[in-house]
Amino acid sequence: MKYILFDFDGTLADSAQLYMNAWNLLAGRYNFKPVTKEDLVSTRNLTIPEKARQYDFPMHKLPVILPQIYRYFKEHVNDVKLFEGIKETLGKLAQNGYIIVIVSSNSKENIDLLLQQEQIGSVSQVMSSSRIFGKDAVIKKFMKIHNCAPHEMLYVGDEVRDIVACNKVSVPFMWVSWGLDGFELIEKEKPKYVAHTPEEIIDAILSNQP
């Protein structure tokens, strides 16, 4: 294993409150239901279409809503922090020779802003997917650019759409429990690893070194 690909929001960045604020700001304008902190817990094992129905949100409006949410993120990036222990985890993996890459549906500009804000120097590359369900295409592009095979990679993420994308391109997946989606949703897709703390990310990866 050479490349560790990380999702950003919910895996590295503790951005749930910011996204909730952005969503609720737009809810009144576009007539869908607002989200509460309790909702984030109670909907962890719902799919994206199921969540959309719960909030009266038409999925075809995603291309309209997402750019506004990411613009809100940029304007409020100072309110976002990395999860505790993530900076140290990234640094230790880089020190052990792993190449750290972020693959996210958030914008590269937003991710770079937060990495700069948090003084992260261990990330080699940031790749952004323009479509919320398009990460498999980005991962495939990464493999082509770097001429690497799926077994040389590990993707670390918190959402079912991440593991579905990885399964399409045969890249092993590690689920982190502190993010958006619950294990009931994830386990059906058979993650290779499960981590409940950033330290467990390191332990799982280093214990599988050849």
Image (spheres, rainbow, N blue to C red):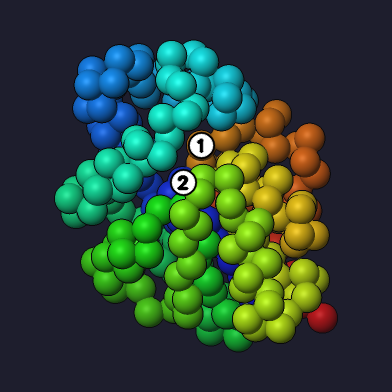
At which x and y percent is residue 175?
A: 65, 48
Q: Residue at x 30, y 41 (%)?
A: 69
Query: Which of disc 2 and disc 1 is earlier in sequence?
Result: 2
Closer to the camera in the image, 186 or 59: 59
Q: Is residue 196 above or below residue 109?
A: above
**Could you tell me which secondary element the residue under label 1 belongs to?**
loop
- In this rendering, position of residue 120 left or right of residue 193: left
Under mark 2, the amino acid is Gly
Q: Position of residue 17 (x, y in %)?
A: 31, 36
Residue ID at (57%, 24%): 49
What is the x, y in percent for residue 130? Answer: 47, 54
Dot 1 alpha-carbon crowd within 10 angstroms: few under 14, some 14 to 19, many 20 or more: some
**Mark 2, other Cα within 10 Å: few <14 / some 14–19 / many ≥20:** many
Looking at the rendered image, the quarter that the C terminus falls into is bottom right
Residue 169 placement, left or right of 203: right
Q: Are marks 1 and 2 in contact (CB under 8 Å)?
A: yes
Residue, disc 1:
180
63 up-or-down from 119: above or below: above
On residue 116, the disc is none
Any mark on residue 10, and which? 2
Front residue of 103 and 209: 103
User: What is the three-letter code of the residue carrying label 1?
Assistant: Leu
Q: Say which quarter of the image contains residue 144.
A: bottom right
Residue at 35% of width from left, 16% of height from top? 32
Instruction: In this rendered view, identify the residue nearer to me: 200 or 62.
Output: 62
Say which element carries label 2: loop
Q: Quadrant of residue 147?
A: bottom right
Q: Is residue 193 left or right of residue 14?
A: right
Which percent across, then down, holds residue 92?
52, 76
Q: Is residue 98 above or below residue 185?
A: below
